[in-house]
Image (tube, rainbow, N blue to C red):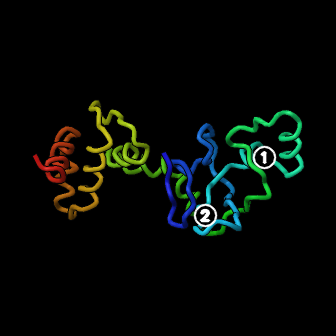
Amino acid sequence: MEKTLPSGIKVRSKGRCWYSLCDRSAEQVVTFQSEHSTRKQVPLGYCSDCIEQWFLSDEEYEQREAGGRNVLGTGIYRRSWYEIREPSEVEAAELAYERDAEERWKAEGRVGKYRRIVELHQAAKVDGFLVDAWTAAACVKLHDTLNEANRKKWLGLDVRGQCHVAATLLFGK
């Protein structure tokens, strides 16, 4: 699942590398550079290993293209067409915050489990009940909206009760 950080960098959930088969954390920012494009290019977060593997130097790119291996495939890019840089302080802080998501979710208890379901768009069991992403989103929204007194009452309910109240209030009958 992709996520756009406040600074504009696109990464996968939990701040992982943009390459879909990679589970390492994004460490560098890659932006396509085109003199012909009229729209702003979106920066993407990649790990160092994927950059070394997929972004080839001009010479290596042309050798592969000319050497009969013209099937470069998707994911093989000419490095000179991209700006590859270290993240700024703000971007690095955002990436670190995303990497620490699991710890934040664990610290929040049951509500953290709901947040995890919403973030990863994966249904999961919460205290024995299977909770889908829509219901988990309703629970998170309700939790964040309630005042302290009502939040305390809502947190006193079991998972089934929390999900029922959240879904009823946010989605109707």
Q: Give whichever of 83, 107 is nearer the camera.
A: 83
Residue hosting label 1: 52
Name the secondary structure under disc 2: loop
Q: How many marks on residues?
A: 2
Residue 41's label in the rendered image is 2
Indicate whether 28 appears above or below 37: above
Label 1: few (<14), some (14–19) or many (≥20) C-alpha neighbours in 10 Å: few
Indicate whether 146 appears above or below 124: below
Q: Callout 2, which amino acid? A: Gln
Residue 10, picture quadrant: bottom right
Q: Quarter holding the C terminus?
A: top left
Residue extending farthest to the top is: 128
Left or right position of 105 against 131:
right
Label 2: few (<14), some (14–19) or many (≥20) C-alpha neighbours in 10 Å: few
Q: Residue 120: image x %, image y %?
A: 43, 43
Q: Callout 1, which amino acid? A: Glu
Q: Residue 89: image x %, image y %?
A: 64, 69
Q: Give whichever of 150, 167 is nearer the camera.
A: 167
- Residue at 73 percent across and 62 percent down: it is 83
Indicate whether 108 appears above or below 74: below
- Residue at 69 percent across and 43 percent down: it is 75
Name the secondary structure under disc 1: helix
Q: Residue 17: image x %, image y %?
A: 62, 47
Q: Give whichever of 164, 31 is nearer the camera.
A: 31
Residue 100's label in the rendered image is none
Q: Residue 49: image x %, image y %?
A: 74, 44
